[in-house]
Amino acid sequence: MAKGQANEEEVLLKEKSDRRLLPHVPDPLGQRTNLDRRGKYTNDEDLTTLIKEHALGVRYINRFPVKVKAESQGRPFKVTGECRDISDTGMLLAVEEDYDLLKEAKNVHLNFKVPAGSMPEGHEMRFRISGQVVRSVDSSQAVGIEFSQTLPSYMNRHKDRYLLLCAAILLAFVSLCVVLMRAESVIYFKYNAVLYSYSLIAAAFLLTRYLFGSLYRPVPINPDFTPSVTIVIPCFNEEKWIQRTILSCLDQAYPVDKLKVYIVDDCSSDQSVTKIHELLERLNDKEGDRYRVNDRVKLFVQEKNAGKRAALVRGVEQTDTDLVMFVDSDSFLEPDAVRNLVQPFQDPKMGGCAGRCDVANTYTNALTEMQSVRYYIAFRIMKAAEGVFDAVTCLSGPLSCYRRDLVMKYKDRWINQRFLGHKATFGDDRAMTNFILDHHRCGYQDTAVCSTIVPRKHRVFLKQQMRWKRSWLRESLMAGCFMWRKEPYAAVNFYIGLIVPIMAPVVVVYNLLYVPLTQHIFPRTFLVGLLLMSLMMSFAQLFLRKSTTWTFGFLFCIYYELVLLWQMPIAWVTFWKSTWGTRQTPSDVAAQEKKDQRKLKRQAQMEGGANEKG
């Protein structure tokens, strides 16, 4: 889909549907392997390897031109076709001419460029690769071609090694520049101790985050560790995505008898409940007997809208599994997400764990591409750095897991949480994380991946960010009461991470307005510092993900300084607000009614004044 349509529809990866609704679920009858429909791999192989091998075979529906050189009947020929679907191991290629020659062809050489958004990030490049015809479809004049090597292998040989080298050099150069600039801060420290202290602290905070993020390693899979898990999905007016979310939660490479999925609808006013019932009927018809869908999947509908926390608690109360996993209703799990996310709980002191959240609609427009970079760095660097010390301060809502007994222990405080006399409605993930982290460890598992739908319109995005800043401010102040007991680096890093964002607006005003206007000095050093920080984010994205979205890291930093930064002062004085802004919760409805009443009152006063003048 063209980007010009971005305002009408999300741009998502289009996976070719499987004839089975739950192709990744282990067969409880042992009649077929869950990881490869062709039976190529056996269950005796290493599970991590099996999952990676299966990912290579995922096919994506696409339409892009492919140039072909081949030999048929002893003579070479050229033809241009169109890719219909592609995976890391092969493609289905349709042609209008020379089909009979192509289906008998030998020594096939392909030349094509994968468009951005048609395969997972990092694949967007030109491929010149050989292959062989393995099947033909006469009805559509298409042939199936198996590549001589996988696309990741090709990328590693022709692109990745150079990108890694360039990105590593650029990251090292930027880091060195930051260190040298901070050395200047030490030299001039006596002239403005407060300003240069902030500069040194901010640089140390950022550099150490990147350092420890690079040292992070996920907990490897222990195939014998399969605790019982219930995935709880709170749903409110999510008719568009809820079916896809439920399917992704059920379609897991995890033992059937150890996984349940509970959906709690918080009195939706759209067709969410109808959509859920439709999916459950399909599941029961096609997979019900084999996978015990009726026993493992349950829907609960709240009598009245009670909020996301109440919905989550109801799901937890209805189950008895060892762990409970919270998944947002617009988030989609990778098939191995549950298997990976439970691994840190082999440590009995681990109370909760977060997975990585990617952006599902990355290529919708520039705003979603900026968010894609921001999400990846926030999880793979920032949250991973906290995960090194098992002190993750936010087990994010799209994908998080807890010991059920701990959620039950804190459920009443969670639902009834108040701050300075005001009821806390949003920020449920940070609030529960605080309860757990106070006495237990909270980890991060980068191999447990979900993707989520992010706002594509600036108005909605800004409302979301304001809500997050308010909850961050409230919960960070509360976490400050116990974080000093954690590992020294984690504690110091937390308090610095609290001070730096709060002071940032003041520092920006001082450097960009006060100093230039009063001392007539151009803020060159400050601007160069901002440039280096933004380049560090972009180069880290390039190094770790090798995606063309890396340039949007720089754009996001500019967007943050010009727009998002100034939400912080507003959050200081409006942290008590309970409206979500992005959906019509009871708080939003009540706030809108008050706003309408004030508007009507002003209109009445204006009309009354006009009548008196008349």
Image (cartoon, rainbow, N blue to C red):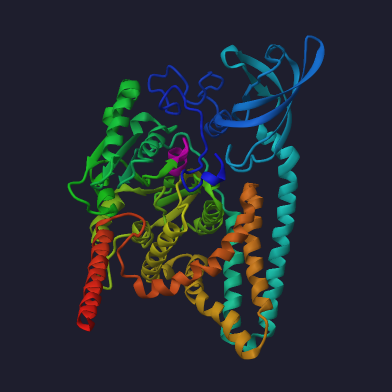
User: Residue 366 location, x and y as percent?
Assistant: 56, 53
The C terminus: image quadrant: bottom left
Measuring 46% from the left and 35% from the top, which residue is drawn there? 335
* Residue, far left: 303
Measuring 60% from the left and 56% from the top, which residue is drawn there? 552
Residue in the foreground of this view, choosing between 383 and 23? 23
Span of residues in magenta: 333-342
User: Residue 414 location, x and y as percent?
Assistant: 27, 59
* Residue, far right: 75
User: Residue 120 location, x and y as percent?
Assistant: 58, 40
Tell how many labels.
0
Measuring 42% from the left and 68% from the top, which residue is drawn there? 483
Q: Is residue 295 above or below residue 522?
A: above
The N terminus: image quadrant: top right
- Residue 467 makes an appearance in the image: yes
Q: Is 475 placed left or right of 117 in the picture?
A: left
Quadrant hosting residue 56:
top right
Q: Is 563 placed left or right of 267 in the picture?
A: right
